[in-house]
Image (cartoon, rainbow, N blue to C red):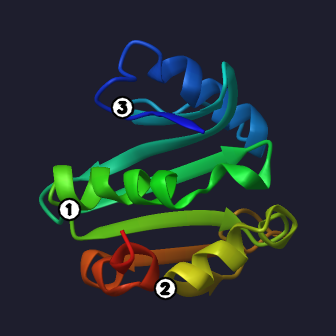
Amino acid sequence: MNILPPEAAQEVEKDLAAWCARQIGYSRVWGHCRALGVFDDEKLVAAAIYHNWQPEAGVIEISTAAITPRWLTRKVLHELFAYPFDRLGYQLVVLRISANRGEDRGICRMCRAFGFEEYRIPRLRGRDEDELIFTLTDDAWRASRFEKVR
C-alpha cells in the first residue's frame, strides 16, 4: 500500500473527499478539509478526511472509507494518526459513524481495538438512526499497542 499524506494530497483532496463521501453514502462533501489517500499500486482503496477543525480545543474529526479491509496496515495506521497528533499537535480525534452501518463496515471493531472511547447517541442521524461517536486522545494513541510497536 502506498500513502498520499495530507501534506502531499492538497491538490487532490477535493477528489479524495468526494470519493470518501460517495463510499459512505454521505450526501455532501466536506468544506475545509485535508485528506489522506491509500493506494494499491495506482488504485485508490481508502481515504481519510480530516474535517470539523477546532484548533482552540485541539480537536479534529476524521471520516474514512475503504473498498478493501487490507488498507489499514500498521504504516497507514501510524500515518492516519500522526497527522492530527504529531504534526498538528491536536489532542483528540473524533470519528462519527451511523449505528446502522458501523458494524457492517467493521469500523466499530477497528475503533474498539485501537482504544477509542465509544458513545451511542440516539436519533442523532434522524428519528430512526442512532450515531456512534468514537473519540481517541493523543495519550491513548501513544499508549496503544499499535503505536508502541512502530
Q: Residue 67 sits in which quadrant? A: top right
Dot 2 falls on a residue whose secondary structure is loop
How far is the residue under mark 2 from the one under mark 1? 17 Å
Q: Which residue is mark 3?
A: 32
Q: Can you identify the residue that label 1 sits on?
A: 90
Q: Badge 3: few (under 14), some or many (20 or more) residues near its Cα, within 10 Å? A: few
Q: How many marks are shown on the rendered structure?
A: 3
Q: Amino acid at mark 1?
A: Tyr
Are circles 3 and 1 on residues that touch, CB within 8 Å? no
Comparing 106 with 55, the one in front is 106
Instruction: Look at the picture and state if 96 lies above or below 75.
Output: below
Quarter of image, res 126 = bottom right
Q: What SS does tag 3 mark?
A: loop
The quarter of the image holding the C terminus is bottom left
At horizontal 60% and vertical 49% (from top left) the residue drawn is 64
Q: Position of residue 123 (x, y in %)?
A: 72, 74
Look at mark 2 in the image and give the residue it sits on. 115
Q: Nearer the viewer, residue 122 or 136?
A: 136
Q: Position of residue 147 (x, y in %)?
A: 37, 74
**Marks 3 and 1, how far apart in space?**
17 Å
Decide which of tag 3 and tag 1 comes sooner along the chain.
3
Please tell me the numbered disc located at residue 80. Answer: none
